[in-house]
Image: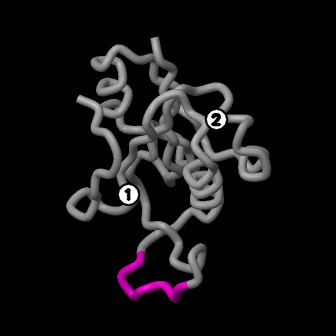
Amino acid sequence: MLAVGICAAIEEVRWGPWEDVATMLPRSYANAVQRSGGVALVIPPDEAAVEDPDLVLGRVDALVLAGGSDVDPTSYGETPHPQTQRVWPERDRFELATATRPAGLASTRSGWSQGPWPRRRRVGTALR
């Protein structure tokens, strides 16, 4: 059974009496992995993994970059567009480090670009 890491989003949330910043993931991502026969592992952004992506990649067979907030355009040398919404640079650093690491995973990497649902684009292999 494959262990599939799913990168979690960072969002400001309200839950009952709490209002906080949370790492979170829509349940549909884990459901897709489980329907495909894998074990879903939710992975929050981690600065240690930015420096050494193998801390994460060495523990999973596949990696999914889930949707979420906009990618910070400054992370790839561009100026933010006026419509760019909330960005989480720590998430961008983590996902760029793990996604751009030379292939070493046992199976294909798969993911969706960050951004509002209508603008997400699937890349790689789809989970059914």
Q: Residue at x 58, y 55 (%)?
A: 100
Q: Give percent across and percent down for residue 10.
A: 53, 51
Against 58, residue 49 (above or below) is: below
Against 87, residue 60 (above or below) is: above
Q: Secondary structure at mark 2?
A: helix
Please tell me which residue lies in front, 41 or 22: 41
Which image quarter: residue 38? top left
Which three-letter amino acid code belongs to the residue tagged 2? Leu
Q: Name the residue that disc number 1 marks.
A: 113
Q: Give percent across and percent down for residue 19.
A: 53, 48
Please tell me which residue lies in front, 83 or 64: 64
Q: Name the residue that disc number 2 marks.
A: 57
Which image quarter: residue 25? top left
Q: Secondary structure at mark 1?
A: loop
Against 73, residue 82 (above or below) is: below
Please provide the residue range marked out in magenta.
78-84
Q: Are marks 1 and 2 in contact (CB under 8 Å)?
A: no
